[in-house]
Image (cartoon, rainbow, N blue to C red):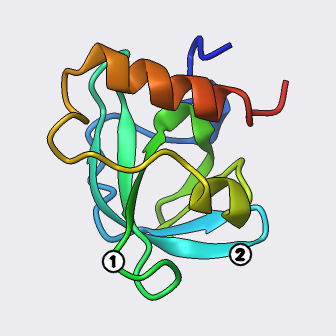
Amino acid sequence: MSDGIWGYQPTAGHTAGTDLTGYKVEATDGAVGKVDKHSDEAGSAYLVVDTGVWIFGKHVLLPAGTVRTVDTDGQRIHVELTKEQIKNSPEFDKDRHVGDAAYHDKLGGYYGGHRPL
């Protein structure tokens, strides 16, 4: 179910190496925050989103496969998730988000279940 969740969809319009830091992130039903950091690593690409005042003090990790489009001119990223799905996502763990297969499996399972087929 979580196959491909850690890579950008070919139709997303993302070019590897593009700095997405600071881009605004939009769910299907509104703004959720801005990109704090990201990775283009093959098989482990993701965005860390600072939700700002929407969910005060919370950061969420979104696998790259949840990205629908990247608008480099407007510096916006649209994801295939609702605000509620993002709000209910597993807790972001800054100590485990890099290189922890079990953590990635947990996130991949959650987000993979919310992707359109």
Give the left or right position of residue 16, taking residue 109 as reference.
left
Q: Earlier in the sequence, mark 1 or mark 2?
A: 2
In this figure, what is the number of numbered marks? 2
> Where does the image place residue 34, in percent across and percent down from the top left?
41, 71
Residue at image location 56% in from the left, 41% down from the top: 13
Among the 4 quarters of the image, the one containing residue 98: top left
Give the left or right position of residue 40, taking residue 29 as reference.
left
Q: What residue type is labelled 2?
A: Gly
Kind of element beneath mark 1:
loop
Residue 30 circle label: 2
Write down the residue under mark 1: 57
Q: What residue type is labelled 1?
A: Gly
Q: In this view, does 116 lie above or below 18?
A: above
Residue at image location 38% in from the left, 24% down from the top: 104
Residue at image location 35% in from the left, 49% down from the top: 92
Residue at image location 60% in from the left, 17% down from the top: 2
